[in-house]
Image (cartoon, rainbow, N blue to C red):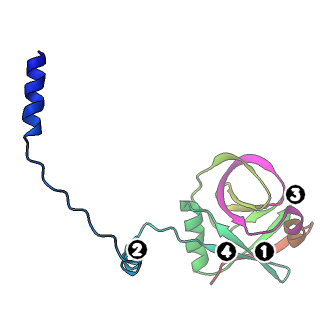
């Protein structure tokens, strides 16, 4: 048995080994050009969609979620702004969009800044917390709960949603 192992090792050591070519390092400018070409040809890149929310003469922005429902909303907003009569209930302002979107509800706890779709046709903007079954639409950019509540006020308000140009 030992003799067979030694004979196998001896035969393997006689096998011709092909040299491996190691490529030269790319110059920085060549690498950058190649990276740019790869990025410009990548159709799977995520495009951030930003929505304006206007109420009482003031405008804030929100980043739309990366999901089919938010993309569907963006398509509607490309056709023109949507004005919604929104009601307050202590932790959110909500109102009917005037059209339905495809919902993909999930049980979530909405927190301040969350924008959710409820019942396929109501938009909700939260400045408090609530656990329910919603479809995420986006998130208000850079406002605290107090700032967001002050933006909407305590009563009913007309709110216009549009895509940021």
Circle nearer the viewer, 2 or 1 = 2
**Gap between marks 2 and 3 measured at Cα:** 50 Å
Which quadrant of the figure has residue 60?
bottom right
Dot 2 or dot 3: first in sequence order is 2
Density class for disc 3 (Cα within 10 Å; few <14, some 14-19, many ≥20) is: few
Q: Which residue is mark 4?
A: 51
Dot 4 or dot 2: first in sequence order is 2
Dot 4 or dot 1: first in sequence order is 4
Q: Which residues are magenta?
A: 126-147
Secondary structure, mark 1, is strand
Q: Position of residue 137 (x, y in %)?
A: 65, 62
Dot 1 or dot 3: first in sequence order is 3
**Gap between marks 4 and 3 measured at Cα:** 23 Å
Dot 4 or dot 3: first in sequence order is 4
Q: Residue at x 58, y 52 (%)?
A: 104
Above or below residue 116? Residue 61 is below
Secondary structure, mark 4, is strand
Circle nearer the viewer, 4 or 2 = 2
Q: Which residue is mark 2?
A: 35
Above or below residue 111? Residue 164 is below
Density class for disc 4 (Cα within 10 Å; few <14, some 14-19, many ≥20) is: many
The label on residue 89 is 3
Q: Position of residue 32 (x, y in %)?
A: 41, 77
Q: Which residue is mark 1?
A: 159
Dot 2 or dot 1: first in sequence order is 2
Q: Position of residue 71 (x, y in %)?
A: 55, 67
Secondary structure, mark 3, is loop
How many callouts does the rendering have?
4
**Gap between marks 4 and 1 measured at Cα:** 12 Å
Circle nearer the viewer, 4 or 3 = 4
């Amino acid at each position: 048995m030992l003799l067979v192992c030694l004979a196998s090792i001896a035969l393997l050591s006689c096998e011709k080994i092909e040299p491996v070519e190691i490529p030269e390092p790319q110059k920085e400018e060549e690498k950058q050009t190649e990276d740019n070409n790869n990025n410009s040809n990548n159709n799977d890149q995520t495009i951030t969609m930003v929505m304006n929310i206007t109420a009482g003469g003031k405008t804030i922005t929100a980043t739309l979620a990366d999901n089919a429902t938010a993309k569907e909303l963006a398509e509607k907003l490309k056709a023109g702004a949507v004005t919604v009569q929104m009601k307050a209930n202590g932790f959110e302002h909500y109102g009917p969009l005037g059209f339905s979107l495809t919902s993909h509800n999930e049980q979530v706890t909405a927190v301040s800044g969350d924008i959710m779709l409820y019942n396929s046709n109501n938009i909700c903007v939260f400045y408090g917390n609530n656990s329910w079954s919603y479809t995420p639409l986006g998130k208000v950019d850079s406002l605290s709960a107090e700032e967001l509540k002050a933006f909407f006020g305590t009563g009913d308000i007309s709110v216009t949603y549009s895509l940021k140009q």
